[in-house]
Amino acid sequence: MAKNKGPRTVQCYHCRHRFEVGGRAQSTSCPGCNKPLIVEDLVFDTKRSGIGRIKVQTCGTITVKKGGRVTAELVEAHGGVVCLGTIEAKKVISGRTLVLGKASLFYGALQAPAVDMAAGARVKPSLFEVPSDPLGLGDLEEN
Amino acid sequence: MAADGESTIVGSDSHFEGKLSFERTAKINGKFDGEIRGKGELQVSQNALCKADVQAGAVAVDGRIEGNVKAGDTVRLNGSGVVKGDIVAAKMVMQEGASFYGMCAVGPDAGQGAPPAPPKPEPSKGGEAGKK
């Protein structure tokens, strides 16, 4: 049975406009710029699941499971990123804490308010800016 | 500087400028300007400021380091820790709340060239014997 979730505030990753969506919404259009938005949580659990996409963006969370791999120019998740597999990107923006598991491999210029990195995580030479709030989500209440 | 057991300690009311070398453990509680090299673990306490390039077996940061950090084993960036500079280490643990601005390279290959990991403390004979 689906969880009964209330509305939540999201921020458009195109124009940064903020608005409310239903708790169970998976995608919508931004009322500010009319562009389509993904607001659901994305999960990548296979080696090929996230490869070849130029931008992987969501207003929710991105979870890369063990064995999963995301290769993209931009990875952006306003709800936070959990990486237990591999993320290779030019730029990674996490609106909340980036979690790097003990078997994770990470590459990309990172902007996140916080990082929780376990011993054993590997990072290819990458620029880290922690904490940073590129989305101005600091004042957006937790959903 | 004072000796405490086998540790080298820069006290909280001290300001040290220059090169520091150590074998086992060094703890910075005050201010340090210069260069730090050691085979063991460097601990930077919560209110400490360390403007130095650091090369050590392991580094634990609760205070602030402004400079590049290279560790043969683990860099532990605790919740109150701040690093402005590059980090190269075989392993890195970063807690929520820690701040880090710089390039980061972590992995078994990344720390090559840094001092080897600090020697692990010998297990206490009493405790081991008790388990057996």
Image (cartoon, coloured by chain):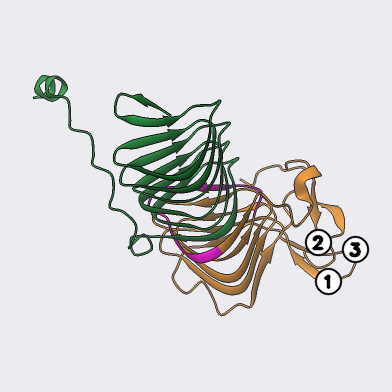
- The alpha-carbon separation of the residues under discs 3 and 1 comes to 8 Å
Q: Which residue is mark 1?
A: A35
A98 w.r.t. B108: above or below: above
Q: Assess whether residue A113 is covered by the magenta stretch.
A: yes
| Whether marks 1 and 2 lie on the same chain | yes
Question: Which numbered disc covers residue A12?
Answer: 2
Name the chain letter of the residue that bears numbered label 2: A
B25 w.r.t. A124: above or below: above
Q: Which residue is mark 3?
A: A31
Residue B127 sits in which quadrant? top left
Q: Look at the image and give the residue range highlighted in magenta.
A: A112-126
The N terminus of chain B, quarter of image: top left
Q: Nearer the viewer, mark 3 or mark 2?
A: 2
**1 and 2 marks in contact (CB < 8 Å):** yes
Q: Nearer the viewer, mark 1 or mark 2?
A: 2
B37 w.r.t. B111: above or below: above
- In the rendered image of the structure, the colour used to display chain B is green
| Whether marks 3 and 1 lie on the same chain | yes
Query: SS at mark 3?
Result: loop
- The alpha-carbon separation of the residues under discs 3 and 2 comes to 9 Å
Q: Left or right of A125: which side holds B22?
A: left
Question: According to the colouring, which chain is orange?
Answer: A
Residue B115 sits in which quadrant? bottom left
Q: Amino acid at mark 1?
A: Lys
Q: Is residue A102 visible?
A: no
